[in-house]
Amino acid sequence: MDKITVTTTINAPVGTVWAAYTDATRIPHWNFATPDWHCPEAEVDLRVGGRVVSQMAAKDGSLSFAFGATYTEVTPPHRLAIRMDDGREAVTCFEAMQGRTTVTTCFDPETQNPVAMQQMGWQAILENFRRYLEG
């Protein structure tokens, strides 16, 4: 199955973008796809073999799950790769361009939800991240 790609360009330098993307105290501010969800907490051990875990929860309390992964590559401030707990992989690249940063994530789709839905969800999270940094 082909990888899914999402991307956005943020009006901030690459170091600022990297720091916000990898800081466990900042991840809860942007890591959700729709306004009725939130990310109550996140943990980051930013090293190869370290873990990233984000708690994802519906604001009404009806559903929650932990999104967990292990870092397989950490190259500040340009590239992060993870292996999700279900075995899928994702790579996020941070490209500096004249004071702005393009963030691109390519990831293996899962088999339970349509590809278009997965792409929309990951893109929405990336747009929340952009709005958080630019706001």
Image (spheres, helix red, strand yellow):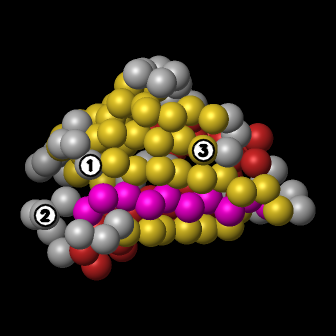
95 sits left or right of 69 in the view: right
Q: Amino acid at mark 3?
A: Arg
Q: Amino acid at mark 2?
A: Thr
Pick the quarter of the image with the N terminus. bottom left
Q: CA distance from mark 2 to mark 1?
A: 11 Å
Q: Badge 2 is on which residue?
A: 111
State the image quarter where residue 129 is shown.
Answer: bottom right
Q: Which mark is residue 88?
A: 1
Residue 117 visible in image: no
Badge 1, how many Cα within 10 Å: few under 14, some, many 20+?
few
- Rendered residue at 37%/68% (across/down): 4
- Which comes before the other along the chain, label 3 or label 1? 3
- Rendered residue at 55%/68% (across/down): 7
Pick the quarter of the image with the C terminus. bottom right
* Secondary element at tag 2: loop
Tell me: residue 77, above or below residue 48.
below
Residue farthest to the bottom, as pictured? 116
Q: Percent position (x, y) of residue 83? A: 33, 39
